[in-house]
Amino acid sequence: MSPRIGSVIGASAAAVLLLAVGACVDEKKVEVERPFFQQPPAAAAGFLGYTDTTKDNKKTACGNCHVAHAADWAETKHAHAWLDMKSSSHAAESCEACHSVSQLGNAAASANVAYTSTKDPRYVDVQCESCHGSGLEHALAPDGTTKPLASIAADTGAAGKTGCTGCHSGTHDPFAEEWRPSKHGILEVHAATSTSTTGKCVNCHTGQGWLVRQGVTAHYQEMGNTGANSAAITCAVCHDPHSDKNAAQTRLAINVADTTKNLCMTCHMRESEADPANTRGPHSPEGPTLLGEAGWFGPDFTFKPGDLRGTHATGDMCVTCHMSTASFASDTKGNLNVGHTFQATPCVDASGKFVGGDCTDDQRSFKACTASGCHGSEAAARSAYATGELRINTLVAEANRLIALVPASEFKAPDTIVTVGEGAKFNVQVAQKPGAVVHNPFLTEALLTSSISALKKQYKLTSTPGFPLMNVLRAQGK
């Protein structure tokens, strides 16, 4: 392919033309031919790489047409991955395939392509083709049928080499190992195949659904897949490979106190307010809980929405605890961070080794609480959690006792109004959501105490004799 590109003749050449033709012009446009790319070596397997490899003027062959994407990519760490590796104190040949265009990250048919097969400097850095695959066929016939589409999958093939996990895995960068067993890494087929007309399930439980909901129109291999063929919440769902607008190349910011603009909260904010048409209670109210906006604000609730913001609702918010840098020994892959397990207080064995899964509170590690700088020691964090849990569990028990005494006729959702009984029950459900004690103990306690007060007034009920335990706890400063 050799498109024709205009070139301008300078002043001296123009003067010669002026004498030759007698025309009153000082310049003339002449079309010359320049190829968009150099033919790649046969061993490169159709990968094009850079057309210009000079340090300050790197240009990918793909960027000749896809100018906007190339400009965005140039601002990311991928664009200087090779120099970063070479400048480090631990650069080794084994690092090169992940810091250059290679067979990793794409669906290359050969075991060695581009840099690993040629050692040609045109293939250094993590370029477009690192994810999209070889571009030669598309460059020769860019008619839309040869597009080298990237994949949003993150575990395909026996070695899991396609997609981000082709490189972001292993002892050095164990993101795949952390993510794979997490709830983000597991497709909930029931939610993915939901026939709900609202689309709420697929919009948060599938990669395709979330990308559509956020208006992402860039094409990828699995685009349009539905049901059991949907992708889980993979790397490319949360991270934008083309843009460095946000920290860690996230598609939305992580430090914005807004449930519509915070990356995590776009999903972790479902059904956080009592709704007379809702028969199942809160679904994923973590974001609004943190921001002091979740729950039923009944007649005895004395605060305005947002008044009782959680102490963790600062800085990077959710990420501070759920993607901590605290590290744990692993059975299979060196040291794992909490990172992409998204577990703020993960389960560990007696030796402190990360085991994941579910466990009792005394089997959990509170390293993330100290790594974040919020608590001085694990013991202090564990004590604060235990105290908050005791206070809230005491309130939940009393609220449930009173709710059991409310006439059944008060619980008739779906309806047009939320009764005191329904509102109190909703607040109990908010308090019993995983992590409610940490997300916002102040809001949770206020929701429960106001619910208990409203239940007693509305239905002429009295507190249990043991309930003053809360006063004892307060007097002890707990």
Image (cartoon, helix red, strand yellow):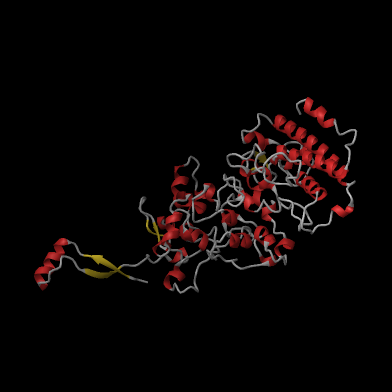
How many numbered circles does the render carry? 0
Q: Residue at x 52, y 52 (%)?
A: 98
Drawn side of residue 377 relative to residue 72, left or right: right
Q: Quadrant of the C terminus?
A: top right
Q: Compared to 173, does 415 lie above or below? A: below
Drawn side of residue 469 relative to residue 89, left or right: right
Q: Residue at x 67, y 51 (%)?
A: 269
Tell me if I can see residue 347 in this picture.
no
Percent position of residue 418, x then y:
78, 52
Percent position of residue 472, x then y:
82, 27
Task: Pick out the residue farthest to the top.
Answer: 476
Q: Compared to 5, does 404 lie above or below? A: above
Task: Report the front residue among 204 and 399.
Answer: 399
Q: Residue at x 81, y 57 (%)?
A: 413
Q: Compared to 470, does 332 lie above or below? A: below
Drawn side of residue 58 relative to residue 130, left or right: left
Percent position of residue 260, x then y:
60, 52
Q: Quadrant of the N terminus?
A: bottom left
Percent position of residue 78, x then y:
48, 52
Task: Report the front residue among 40 and 200.
Answer: 200
Tell me if I can see residue 271 in this picture.
yes
Task: Report the front residue among 383 and 367.
Answer: 383
| Residue 317, image quadrant | top right
